[in-house]
Amino acid sequence: MSTESHLRLVWVYPDLLSTYGDRGNLLILEHRAALRGLPVECVEVRSDRPLPADGDIYLLGGGEDGPQSLAAQRLIADGGLHRAANRGAVVFAVCAGYQLLGRSFYAKGTQYSGLGLLDLHSDRGPSRAVGELAGDIDARLGLPPLTGFENHGGRTHLGPEAHPLARVTAGIGNDGTTEGAWRGRILGTYSHGPALARNPALADLLLQWAVGGALAPVDNTWPERLRKERLSAVTPS
Ligand code: GLN
């Protein structure tokens, strides 16, 4: 946690990367930290401002091609996210935000450099991937199956240094086989919804990484009901 002993959550570029309700991920983290009595400060940083390097968790959302390429260029020029990631901050990114953490991606037919924080690159698929997304998460993360909603034209290919977040059981994700990626405390997914409202255990994992220890258990009846309802809609048992 930051030196002021509160959790600093940074919502990166709300003016460019805030599609499909992804700002809800910030609200969920704030709420689930508050349930544990953890003091939280939420910082929203527009793309014309320098990104603070002293955050605990950085959140990036989805975006259309134009805003996505602009966000990548500004983040590379700014350097704050690199500095934060290099000192071990947690980074959680969705869709366009996920693609731009990789080495390169396509937007409006042009290839752009990404930040290179994850060993992956994205190109375009034969059709847009739109609909429910589900997958069995990497067992090392100790999480129940992922559920989300995807809407993207890109396809993502992982290099050896990036672990797939999940094996797809419904939808497309990266390429129809794997979904998302993680390395250290950097984690990306195609799951909107927003992802952390539908996957409360994933929200808690990010908080645990940030505080460096276990969290007190909380009543998960309602978020678990949502997660299971969405999962059973696409992967009936
Ligand atoms: N523009 C990217 C794509 O279409 C990301 C879209 C999104 O963030 N939903 O692949």
Image (spheres, rainbow, N blue to C red):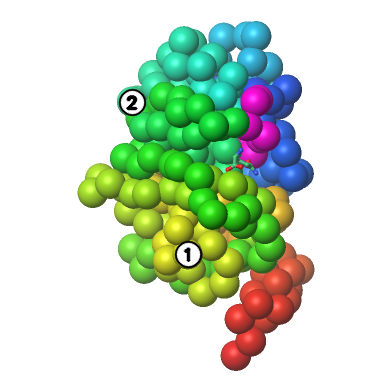
Residue identified by numbered label 2 = 86
- Give the quadrant of ligand 1: top right
Q: CA distance from mark 2 to mark 1?
A: 31 Å
Where is residue 119? Give x, y as percent: 31, 40
The answer to whether 183 appears left or right of 233 in the picture is left
Q: Earlier in the sequence, mark 2 or mark 1?
A: 2
In this view, the residue in front, 43 or 127, is 127
The answer to the question of whether label 2 and label 1 lie on touching residues, with beta carbons closer than 8 A, is: no
> x%, y% of residue 149?
67, 58
Q: Residue at x 56, y 24 (%)?
A: 69
User: Residues in magenta?
Assistant: 61-67
**Which amino acid, mark 2?**
Asn
User: In the image shown, does 111 or 117 lie closer to the viewer?
Assistant: 111
141 inside magenta stretch: no
Label 2 beta carbon less than 8 Å to ligand 1: no
Q: Which mark is residue 176?
A: 1
Q: Is residue 186 above or below residue 237?
A: above
User: SS at mark 2?
Assistant: helix
Crowd band around label 2 with a 10 angstrom C-alpha radius: few (<14), some (14–19), many (20+): few
Q: Which mark is residue 218?
A: none
Query: 75 or 123: nearer the eye?
Result: 123
- Residue 150 appears in the picture as rendered: no
Q: Amino acid at mark 1?
A: Gly
Comparing 7 with 111, the one in front is: 111
Residue 201 against residue 23 in the figure, above or below: below
Residue visible at 49% across and 38% down in the picture: 99
Q: Secondary structure at mark 1?
A: loop
Q: How many residues crowd mark 1 within 10 Å: few (<14), some (14–19), many (20+)?
A: some
